[in-house]
Image (tube, rainbow, N blue to C red):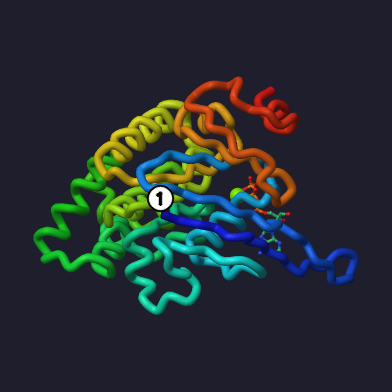
C-alpha cells in the first residue's frame, strides 16, 4: 500500500528577473491500495508529474511523507526493495532512457539490479518482455536514441513491468501514440493487472482513458486533489464542477 500524507512541492522559479515560489503540489493525501486501479487526471501544469515523482521517491517533497507498506520511502536505506515494489513509467522517455544504451540493456538493467537471474533466464525474460510489448527482436541492438517515441514508450513499459512490481505509476503512457498502439497498450495493461495482481496509477489528461482504465479517479487542479471519485466506468460519478468541465 502506498500512502501520500500531505505532500507538497514548491519550486523556485525566475520571473522577470525575480525569484518567486511556485506551488506545484499543495498538501495532497491519497492512498493506493493493493490490487486496485487508479487514475489521476487534470489539465497540463496541474501538478500530476510533480506528484508522481514524489510518490515514486524520485523528487523529495517540500513537505509531507510517502509511505510504502509503512516505510518512509525517503528515509529507507534499501532503495532496491522500493524499486522492486514500485515502478514508474516516465512521461518524458527521451530524457529518462539513456540514449546510448541498447534496447536489450535497457530492459535487462532493472532485472539485473533487482532480481538475481542467470544469463539464460535474463535473456529469456527480455525476449518475453519485448514480445509482449510488440517490439521485434531485431531492435535488441538498437540504441535508445535511434528509436521512435512509441518504441521508447514501449521499452519504458517493458522495463517497469519486468520486475513484477506491486505498484506501477504510468505518467502519460499513451501520449504521442497512435490509436492502435494506445488500444494495444490499454489491453495489455488490463492483462497485466490481472496477471501481476498489482495496483496502478494511470496519469492522463484524457478522462476517457481514466474512466476506461481505473475504478477510482483523482482529479487534480492547481496542485490540489479536488475530487476522488469511485467511478467504475460511470461518467456520472463526478460531483465536482471542475471534473464535469474536464469531461466536456
Ligand atoms: N523542475 C521544475 N522547476 C520549476 N517548476 C517546475 C518544475 N517542474 C514542474 N514545474 C512547474 O510545476 C507545475 C506543475 O508541473 P507538472 O509537470 O507537475 O504538471 P503536469 O500536470 O504533469 O502537466 P502535463 O500534463 O503538461 O504533463 C507547472 O507550473 C510547471 O511549470
Ligand atoms: Mg506531466
Residue name at image x 14 percent, y 53 percent? 124
Q: In this view, does 159 lie to the left or right of 61?
A: left
Placement of the N terminus among the 4 image quadrants: bottom left
State left or right for residue 127 relative to residue 178. left
Residue denoted by label 1: 168
81 vs 234: above or below = below
Residue positioned 58% across, 60% down in the render: 5
Using the image as rendered, state which of residue 55 and residue 135 is in the foreground: 55
Closer to us: 39 or 205: 39
In percent of width and height, residue 224 lies at: 70, 49
Label 1: element kind: strand
Residue 79 to residue 206: above or below:
below
How far across and how far down the image is residue 213, in percent? 45, 32
Can you say which quadrant of the picture contains the C terminus? top right
Farthest residue to the bottom: give it.
77
Q: Can residue 41 be seen in this view?
A: no
Q: Residues within 10 Å of mark 1 (few under 14, many from 20)?
A: many
Residue 215 visible to an observer of this rendering: yes
x and y percentages locating residue 80 in the rendered image: 34, 71
**Relative to 43, residue 144 above or below:** below
Amino acid at each position: 500500500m502506498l500512502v501520500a500524507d500531505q505532500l507538497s512541492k514548491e519550486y523556485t522559479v525566475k520571473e522577470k528577473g525575480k525569484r518567486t515560489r511556485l506551488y506545484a503540489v499543495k498538501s495532497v493525501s491519497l492512498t493506493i491500495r493493493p490490487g486496485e486501479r487508479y487514475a489521476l487526471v487534470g489539465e497540463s501544469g496541474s501538478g500530476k508529474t510533480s506528484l508522481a515523482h514524489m510518490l515514486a521517491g524520485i523528487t523529495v517533497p517540500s513537505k509531507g511523507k510517502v509511505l510504502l507498506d509503512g516505510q518512509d520511502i525517503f528515509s529507507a536505506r534499501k532503495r532496491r526493495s522500493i524499486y522492486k515494489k514500485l515502478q514508474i513509467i516516465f512521461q518524458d522517455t527521451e530524457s529518462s532512457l539513456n540514449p546510448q544504451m541498447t534496447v536489450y540493456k535497457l530492459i535487462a538493467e532493472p532485472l539485473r539490479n533487482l532480481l538475481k537471474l542467470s544469463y539464460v533466464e535474463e535473456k529469456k525474460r527480455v525476449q518475453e518482455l519485448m514480445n509482449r510489448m510488440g517490439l521485434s527482436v531485431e531492435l535488441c541492438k538498437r540504441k535508445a536514441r535511434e528509436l521512435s517515441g512509441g518504441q521508447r514508450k514501449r521499452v519504458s513499459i517493458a522495463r517497469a513491468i519486468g520486475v513484477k512490481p506491486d505498484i506501477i505509476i504510468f505518467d502519460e503512457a499513451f501520449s504521442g501514440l497512435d490509436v492502435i498502439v494506445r488500444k494495444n497498450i490499454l489491453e495489455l495493461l488490463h492483462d497485466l493487472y490481472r496477471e501481476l495482481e498489482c495496483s496502478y496509477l494511470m496519469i492522463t489528461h484524457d478522462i476517457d482513458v481514466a474512466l476506461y482504465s481505473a475504478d477510482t479517479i483523482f482529479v487534480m487542479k492547481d496542485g490540489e486533489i479536488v475530487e476522488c471519485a469511485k467511478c467504475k466506468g460511470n461518467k456520472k460519478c463526478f460531483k465536482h464542477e471542475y471534473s464535469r468541465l474536464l469531461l466536456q
